[in-house]
Image (cartoon, rainbow, N blue to C red):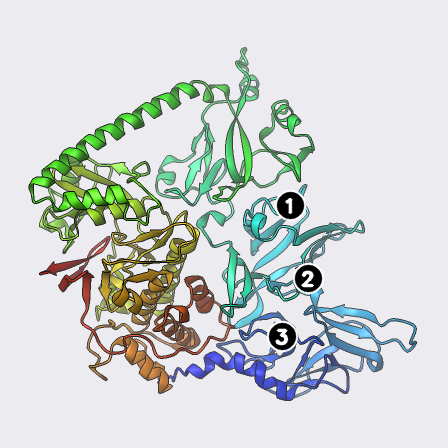
Amino acid sequence: MILLRKVRVFSLFILSHYAVKFCIGGDVITASEYIQDPGSIISSGGLYRLGFFSPNGTTNRYVGIWHNKIPVFNVFWVANRENPVLDSSGVMTISDAGNLVILNGKKQVLWSTNVSTSGANAKAQLLDTGNLILQKQSSNMSTNDTTAWESFQIMCDTQIAKMKLSTNLRTNEKQVLTSWKSPSDPSIGSFLISLEPLNIPEVFLWNGTTLYWRSGPWNGKVFLGIPEMESVYVDRYTLVDDKEGYVYLTYSFAEVSYLSYFFVRSNGELLQPFWDENDKWWRIDWSTQASDCYVYGKCGPFGYCDAKKSPICSCLRGFEPKKVEEWSRGNWSSGCIQKSLLQCDRLKNGSTKAGKIDGFVKLENVKVPNYAIWSSPLEDKCREQCLSNCSCAAYAYDAGVGCMYWSGDLIDVQKFSYPGTTLYVRVAHTELEGKGDLRAIIATAVVVATVIFSIATFFAWQKSKKRGGKDREQFSKASSENMLGGSLSKVNLQELVLYKLEELAAATSNFSDANKLGEGGFGAVYRGRLLNGKEIAVKRLSGASGQGLREFINEMEVISKVQHRNLVRLLGCCAEQDEKLLIYEFMPNKGLDAFLFDPLKREQLDWRRRFNIIDGICRGLLYLHRDSRLRIIHRDLKTSNILLDEELNPRISDFGTARIFGGKEDQADTLRVVGTYGYMAPEYAMEGRFSEKSDVFSFGVVLLEIVSGRQNTSFNEEDQSLSLLGLAWKYWEEDNVSALVDHKISVGCSEIEIIRCINVGLLCTQELAKDRPTISTVISMISNEIVGLPRPNKPAFPERQTTTDTDSSRQSQKKYSANNVTITALEGK
């Protein structure tokens, strides 16, 4: 049996401090003052350290540079990334030829600076910028030492302040960032960051030779494709043309103590963390994996991507899908084509009548397409110049750039929530005609539909009144007081499809038992198929439901406003007669619990799949807590509320008890505690206080259940009095966490990753909310394998509790996991 020992999680952190004992003193290396593993040197101001280290998951030894005064170990530069020392015999010294070299125990050179200096007069020095330089010392006191080589010229996967991402326009030589091959292998990986001196400079992220992401044009202060720079990084970045053929991008901070860096992960994610001194952790300001829209050309030519919409891809106005069937299946790579010929095209086709002149449709707050061409500094000349050029497909203006125009396909257009650039797309005049009438028709239709729906809802409400009046009271309270934290006043159905009851009855074979996926306190969930062949899940509110209209309205409020690949998607609703139904996309694999706690099915969940599920849940929670238009606290996160799609990707579901936070609100209290004991944070279960950290607690429980394959509240053969949290803590204290891991998992090379997840699970389930990490910190913890994790204290609720879905005092006797929500059979009050 492989022993998974928690001590290895902290090995790098311990090493960075232990190495002080072997430090040669000072900040230099010479032929006589060398570093022998595990030795190190420290810059004069104590900011940076250079020494030997091993990434988690390997015993190979590398020489790297990291921040010395930060308790979280994070290497940003590696010397011998392609040739590690295979044992602890490594030495870094100055060779006879004056090069800085790394030798193994056999005195073989594994790495060298490969420059010509004089060995007797050469020295290497670690500066307080983090730069390692090799100097030829001058024998003349009046002459400065000359720098023959510096580490800043050979970047790895990280750009820190004052490093230069550069391109030589004459030779096309580039200083680039290259990802690690894997979290345990610093050798050059698949992803590369380069500065591309196009007509207007941009930063490109490549996956091999394929463009994976682009920054958008540089406007003198920020990149137009990174709107976050407007508020976070403005005035910190500089793009310089040194007039000698070099163009480079660099940045610096007025406060030396402020730490932030650019970093490309082995999976291709580009992100910008900064050091949070209060939390003592790296927080992520910005990342290219915030949504699928960051992938280059996601929606094909003449399409644009909006992460807030579903589906995320749409055609530009005046265009339609090139391949309708593929587009409807979610394959948008073929893009869109024009509906009507432009004036120039009509003339080329021999038309004797050119017709009316083309016009432009406006798309605001976007990332402009690739291959922008600069045309003029004058804004009032943009439209005129584009119209006079038959090849001009669109134009835009930015004060820092001037007029930009595009010819050919418009690729990689993205809609932002932040302020972006306004793009004017050229279309035939026919696409502009009747625009005012169309708006009037749409406005009228919306008003009429709203009135009809209001009337229908009123009569449905009147009928519910006759059944006892309880739902009427809840509906009135939900409408007038807005149970979602006061930020919304009415149910917004603009983004939902209103289905007819007869349509849903036909789709579900009249709600037959054969189509039933599950049943509980809310009602039943049915599998259905619409006339167009689309499979759906229909959640039908029971007339006797204890939850009633409150959760029905709440779920529509919340989930209709959020779209993310790790959240279940609400397609529409129905409120006819006495029926109240919610319609979701169908998840063929049902809930995570159906796999995780089934002895046969859980064999399909190898560690890679489980880790993907963990990461997906994190991304979904991050979106709810930080990245969506609203700040949403789920309040009932558990394995049965995590649905799995056909590829076993996770989708968070059941937003009936979710709450929206507005403004600067970061916690709230409630007299109506809803959720599931065993997953509820102590401050919520006992005091009704909830926040992001209460969701983090629930996630910690789910994380430990995924690793162990056990339910938190189930009997443990080892100790029936302990909950899963108590058992995890017991094994942690005994340094025997391998006993917690599901025996269906083949540990192998995933040992360190599994330990890390158990550590994070315990940190998330701490008794006090302030001791738990945020979900953004959790993502950094589980994905950054070269960071040592804090030691957890004893978690909350170590003793076993009976699983209970609770709404105030209601008790649960039986639970089911259905397609779109975990439903609990509630009996008694």
- Write down the residue under mark 2: 163
- Residue 266 lies, in percent from the top left, at 52, 64
Give the side of residue 659 with respect to residue 142, left or right.
left
Viewer-side residue, 174 vs 234: 234
**Of the residues tagged 3 and 1, which is closer to the observer?**
1
Tell me the element at label 1: loop
Report whether 491 appears left or right of 234. left
Disc nearer the start of the sequence (2/1): 2
Residue at image mark 1: 218
Spatial separation of the CA atoms under disc 2 and disc 1: 18 Å
* Type of amino acid under label 3: Gly
| Mark pair 3, 1: CA separation | 32 Å
Provide residue 428's location: percent of width, then percent of height. Answer: 50, 22
Within the image, what quadrant is residue 153 found in?
A: bottom right
Q: According to the image, label 3 marks what residue?
A: 64
Q: Residue furthest top?
A: 352
Q: Quadrant of the C terminus?
A: bottom left
